[in-house]
Image: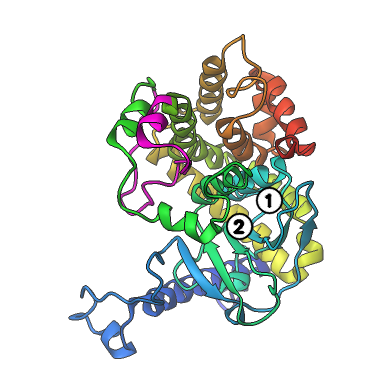
Amino acid sequence: MGNSKFRPSLFTIFFGSFVIFCVIDLIYERYRRSGLTLLQFLSPFNRNSKTVTIENSDEFSNKYVSILKRSALPTIEPTKTIKGALTIPNLKLTLFQYQNCPFCSKVRVFLDYYGLPYDIIEVNPVMRQQIKFSKKYRKVPILLVSEHENFQQSSSELDQNSKEETSVSAMYSYLLSKNPKSKHNNLSLKDLLSWYTSSQVISSQLEKNEQSFETNYPANERNDELINRYFLMIGDLDEKKYEEIDPILARDRYWRKWVDNHLVHILSPNIYRTMEESFNSFRYFSTVSDWERIFPSWQVSIIVNVGATVMYFVGKRLKKKHNLKDDVRQSLYDSCNYWLKSIGPNRKFMGGNFPSLADLTVYGVLKSIEGCEAFKDLCNQTKISSWYFAVKTMVAENQGSS
């Protein structure tokens, strides 16, 4: 008995390797972004220095919006190509995503509803080698935009937009500007993105409009976010006219913020509620994301087994962090009932007869859990189904393109 040797299981080896990989990757990322030499980075006296590095000289380049050269990107075949119903000359969109990431789902839903064609590149959630090119932002979604005829040439510039709400707001503003009657019909998406990186909100009155909505779900905003990211840039209107119509726009901004600050935080504790649910969720993700076709089988095994185990504990931490009820399902039901009550009995959607950006945002994050047990329970315990599947039909038919 004393001579027996401990033989770790294959899962233990995979899990230990994954933890070591994550620690090394985290340290490397901090070093790479610090702008310090290796000796400076390792020195405790320089660790907290205020060194700032500038990666390019574009006047509005920041963590979330950057201008890239085509030559900086690796050659990666799209996982899927969405043809869309709408064609905008010389506009090419590429979405780097996780299929079941709620933030990625929001961007896809917007693009699908408005019938925009785009390529999808599925990112390995463990290795993330597909987004190594992104030096400032190592998360998904990342939307690459090219408005040049010669997209394949190495000299082409691409707009990298890494914040999903900025992507939605900027793309919608861009579509509005393409109206032949618009004074800004000749503006590029790059021009519009520069407005979103401004530190100045159009008017303080616009933010006050959002405060008129009562809520039981307050949430603090991060200080490093783009403060204009929920606004539509309707440049044809003067400030006074914009403020007259803003109560309608403010409603959408309020709900989009509500999704980011509240609803999205309820999802993980629900889909990873138990270890069994966590594994079932990851098996569903593997199927719907087509991981077996895209990634090597050993990577899929790590993603499913390690991911399900880690996210089970992450879900428990998020439950405590966001003060969810002991039965996290009830928090999910309450939030969706709050949304449905706000739509009311006399409207099909929050936007009336057609989905607004608020409808698309709420639908987008819920769509990310559609195949999970939590979603089935949600449909059984609330009246969300009629609204949800009505939006789904509209999105599938590219109704926004007409």
Assign the N terminus to one quadrant of the image.
Answer: bottom right
Disc 1 and disc 2 in contact, CB within 8 angstroms: yes
Amino acid carrying label 2: it is Gly
- SS at mark 2 in the image: helix
Amino acid carrying label 1: it is Phe
The residue furthest left is 45
For marks 1 and 2, give the CA distance.
Answer: 7 Å
- Which quadrant would residue 356 be assigned to in this image? top right
Residue lying at 66% horizontally and 17% vertically, measured from the top left: 348
Residue lying at 44% horizontally and 41% vertically, measured from the top left: 231
Q: Is residue 123 left or right of residue 38?
A: right
Q: Residues within 10 Å of mark 1 (few under 14, many from 20)?
A: many
Q: Report the front residue among 247 and 139.
A: 247
Residue 308 in picture, x, y percent from top left: 62, 53
Magenta residues, dominant SS class = loop
Q: Is residue 234 magenta?
A: yes
Q: Residues within 10 Å of mark 2 (few under 14, many from 20)?
A: some
Q: From this viewpoint, is residue 127 visible?
A: no
Q: Which residue is mark 1?
A: 282
Residue 263 bears which disc, if any? none
- Which quadrant would residue 132 be assigned to in this image? bottom right
Q: Is residue 131 magenta?
A: no
- Which quadrant would residue 77 be assigned to in this image? bottom right
Residue 394 in picture, x, y percent from top left: 74, 32
Q: Which residue is mark 2?
A: 307
Q: Earlier in the sequence, mark 1 or mark 2?
A: 1
Name the colouring of the figure. rainbow
Assign the C terminus to one quadrant of the image.
Answer: top right
Residue 116 in picture, x, y percent from top left: 71, 50
Residue 101 in picture, x, y percent from top left: 61, 50
Q: Which residues are magenta?
A: 216-244
- SS at mark 1 in the image: helix
